[in-house]
Image: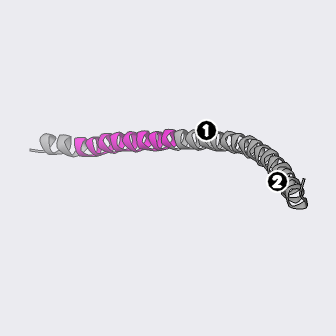
Amino acid sequence: MDITQILIAVTLSVTSLFMVLIGYQVIKILQEIRVVMKKAQTIVDSFERVGSGVENGFNDMMGFVGGLKSVFKILEIFRKRKQSQPDDQNESTTP
């Protein structure tokens, strides 16, 4: 074998070895990214659950406030009716 052929064979062997090592490292990095993405998805899902819980609590609170407003409106109507009722009776009893 000629020295040039030996150098080309050695260079190709070393290059192939480096490519295999780089490929292995890329596979390991991709596996690590996959694990990190699963953890991130878990965190996002938990935040979503917390957010929907807060939203439901807020909606419940707004419903409660709306109910209180309705009760106060009804009480105001009864109060107005009660105040106007004695006036009507006084007018009808005084000829």
Name above or below for residue 84 compared with residue 4: above
Residue extending furthest toward the left: 95
Image quadrant in which you'd find residue 86: top left
User: Which quadrant of the figure has residue 32?
Assistant: top right
Quadrant containing the C terminus in the rendered view: top left
User: How packed is label 2: few (under 14 Cα within 10 Å), some, or many (20 or more)?
Assistant: few
- Magenta highlight: main SS: helix
In the image, 45 versus 52, the foreground residue is 45
Q: In front here: 27 or 22?
A: 22
Measured as percent of width and height from the top left, residue 85 is found at: 23, 41
- Residue drawn at x 85%, y 49% is 17
Q: Nearer the viewer, residue 14 or 73?
A: 14
Magenta region, residue range: 59-85
Q: Which residue is mark 2?
A: 12
Q: Classify residue 91 as left or right of residue 70.
A: left
Q: Is residue 81 magenta?
A: yes
Across and down, in percent, residue 44 comes to: 64, 44
- Indicate the amino acid at tag 2: Leu
Residue type for callout 1? Arg
> Mark 1, residues whose alpha carbon is within 10 Å: few (<14), some, or many (≥20)?
few
In depth, the one of 51 and 80 nearer the eye is: 51
Apparent side of residue 24 relative to residue 69 in the rendered image (left or right): right
In the rendered image, which residue does mark 1 sit on? 49
Rendered residue at 91%/60% (across/down): 3
